[in-house]
Image (tube, coloured by chain):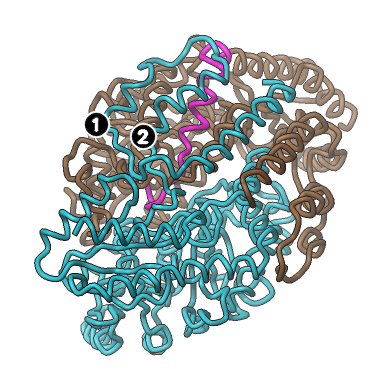
Chain colours: A brown, B cyan
Amino acid sequence: MTSEEFRRHGRRVVDWIADYYDRVEGFPVQSTVTPGEVYAGLPPHPPEQGEPFADVLADLERVVLPGITHWQHPGFFGYFPANASFPAILGDLLSSGLGVQGMLWATSPAGTELETLTLDWLAELLGLPPAFRSTGTGGGVIQDTASSSVLVALVAALHRTSGGASGHVGVTGQYRVYCSQAAHSAVEKAVRIAGVGSDNLRLVDVDPVTQALRPDHLGALIEADQAAGVVPVLVVATVGSTSTTAFDPVAAIGELCRASGAWLHVDAAYAGVAAVCPELRWVNDGVACADSYATNPHKWLLTNFDCDAFYVADRATLVGALSVLPEYLRNTATASGAVIDYRDWQIPLGRRFRALKLWCVLRWYGAEGLRAHLRGHVALAQEFAALVAADERFEVMAPHPLALVCFRLRGVDQPNEALLARLNAGGRIFLTHTRVNGAYTLRLAIGSPLTQETHVRHAWQLIRDSA
Amino acid sequence: MTSEEFRRHGRRVVDWIADYYDRVEGFPVQSTVTPGEVYAGLPPHPPEQGEPFADVLADLERVVLPGITHWQHPGFFGYFPANASFPAILGDLLSSGLGVQGMLWATSPAGTELETLTLDWLAELLGLPPAFRSTGTGGGVIQDTASSSVLVALVAALHRTSGGASGHVGVTGQYRVYCSQAAHSAVEKAVRIAGVGSDNLRLVDVDPVTQALRPDHLGALIEADQAAGVVPVLVVATVGSTSTTAFDPVAAIGELCRASGAWLHVDAAYAGVAAVCPELRWVNDGVACADSYATNPHKWLLTNFDCDAFYVADRATLVGALSVLPEYLRNTATASGAVIDYRDWQIPLGRRFRALKLWCVLRWYGAEGLRAHLRGHVALAQEFAALVAADERFEVMAPHPLALVCFRLRGVDQPNEALLARLNAGGRIFLTHTRVNGAYTLRLAIGSPLTQETHVRHAWQLIRDSA
């Protein structure tokens, strides 16, 4: 493809995307294809000769689009959102175009330094402690997801607790990891991958109303483990849990970590970005005592997936845990010690220039624009919660300080399961579920930039009428 | 940003990228900025109010571009390439635009099924064994990098060897991992992350001429370990090593794995894609006995980073090792067992729709186009190697069947180090180095789609004149 052809096809793709957002509301939110339908709709063998790009776009319409569940649809209320925005798309396009691989500072200094700067900016916007900035003892890095951040935190914690031995001798001691029952499944996945084993993951009780980790129970578990000669290595505190946006008491957890020597990782994947708004800055209360912290601009801060902002208070420990330097990566900048090589801050070696999209978002919206975006969603969620609370058939199942509302029909589970299935089959809205204190619960998470008051009211109307 | 504004800015970004490729040859390949220069060139604080997109593009030119080492420059001969191509950029743009998150089949069926199809297509193009296709017992998945593939393979291997216990009890047994001295540093990183520990990584001797793993030495190491009660869990065979494109004898290694029960992972990150050409299909000889295999379309197959194609022969083991199913991810499609949930094939939970860019590449170029691309680079490398071999001051340091040539000035290391520094400082070409049998060696890896015969001849002229 020549650069002239790229200009032509590129314009067409840009228009296709603009058109997609203009018409997205017309699609059923959840794809209605059956398993195998998309696969069977395309040729079973790759083409021998090249094909026109127009044919690709035609198949995108014919086969791919019906198989899409539209995360950017204004009626998408499932999971947590995966925000996209036009400035982020353009930033990502610039990254694809430049095609640099930023494993080392030397392989594209701007790739590293724009990331450092952008994460310092974000730390300032969120009011994160000075240690998390590159000007302090730590700094930020973009990971793909909060799952990878938990794994990286665990590897660094094992490194610190073992005095640097774990990377060499393996996970030979008996270590324990702690998180609340409401923590993300990524914690269990990380302890499995890192060789600690899920038997060594302690699920701490939560308060039945707030769903927050009970520090008294955490303290008792740590004490019992230490008495048995088991070493607490990591505690994951959740700021805005996946099920209900529960907030663990980070400061109290931090005290237990300091006393026991365990690493404190704060998983603020969804909620952390809310701190851009001064009135929501409390979400990050207590993170000054954390060893690491992660929040996802790709969830609720208009930056398309993947973009998880991971911060550490002590970058030397992180690099010590993850650095391996073969001959073919040696270079004078690395040897000087004056630069960051982000390959040592993450699981993979190679890395994409993801800072560009976050940079585009922070600049296009500015702090004021980001606040307006977040505040709008919080207000809509409060309005929705009030509608639910005013209908005596329903109950609100958990506090809802941000943009997620958990609710259910009073009584047994089955009508709730049926209600969710009916709503999603209707195609106008899409919700997902969880369990709160064992009860099947519907989740309505507001997150699409296209979602307006009218969509939330319409959602409530559909829910009320389908109940 | 409205969709109309996006059309306007989008066109400008597309043109910026087209212009970038039109003028890329005019930039020094390696950035000449000093540490901190890019960071200092931008405001230390994020903007309070949003800014025009034109200002972002202006700063891209003013601050970012000077900090770029141009991987797509025709004179970029460093590391292994990270190919970009216009069709891939467009596919990636479509992915950014759709903004779907394909952690589950249900969260966008087309995201999963297009990936399955595209990796089946690629398996066919590479002549991979039937077990690696979704129609067999295994299948393919896109990982970010070959590093993550090694880690995933190791976690799956531990799961299988321990009879499913490792995920629960941790890495409690004494396990050994094996790879050649020339294997990628990702193997050491993986054994550290997975809790096995680098002390349990055995580096197998290589043949001094071919740099290939010596199976007799591997056999002896395994035998000694087994006699000592240590369990061989994983052998990584390298197909096209990073230093010299050495090829380990995969079939012989496979026999030792079968006898010992160790998992065989084939790391063909750079070289595997060469099998699109029938005359180069030998690169994948023996992989029929592998448990897993990885090759990177993002290195040499015109698909921009990140896109590592990872294949397993037995998907059930992989899923068993990595699956954690919390309530909020349960859905009827998953429960039916009729679909693939790729979250269980990788470290993170969330995932980007990366199949689109690979699909665009395979369709735009077709098998013939891909072959022409690869063959062109192989021919250029052979021409370069002949020029080096004809100059008695130089020596070629290793076999060069693909597009990497390792060479050096005869004699001591220092003049070679000085030569590399001089060449890279010149800005016209960029090479990196390694060590071969201890000797400092220059690497010239041909990989940019823009690289023509004239660039390779010019590179040789610069090398010859600078020597």
The secondary structure type at the circle numbered 1 is: helix
- Magenta-colored segment: predominant secondary structure: helix
Which three-letter amino acid code belongs to the residue tagged 2?
Gly
For mark 2, what is the residue?
A: B67
- Residue A459: x and y in percent read 81, 26
Viewer-side residue, A109 vs B379:
B379
Q: Residue furthest right?
A: A465
- Residue B360: x and y in percent read 67, 55
For mark 1, what is the residue?
A: A258
Pinpoint the chain carrying mark 1: A
The CA distance from mark 2 to mark 1 is: 41 Å
User: Tag 1: Cα neighbours inside 10 Å, few (<14), some, or many (≥20)?
Assistant: few
Give above or below for B337 relative to A155.
below
* Identity of the residue drawn at 86% across and 23% down: A461
Task: Give the residues in magenta.
Answer: A345-371
Viewer-side residue, B270 vs A234:
B270
Left or right side of B1 for A360: left
Q: Residue A259 is drawn in which quadrant?
A: top left
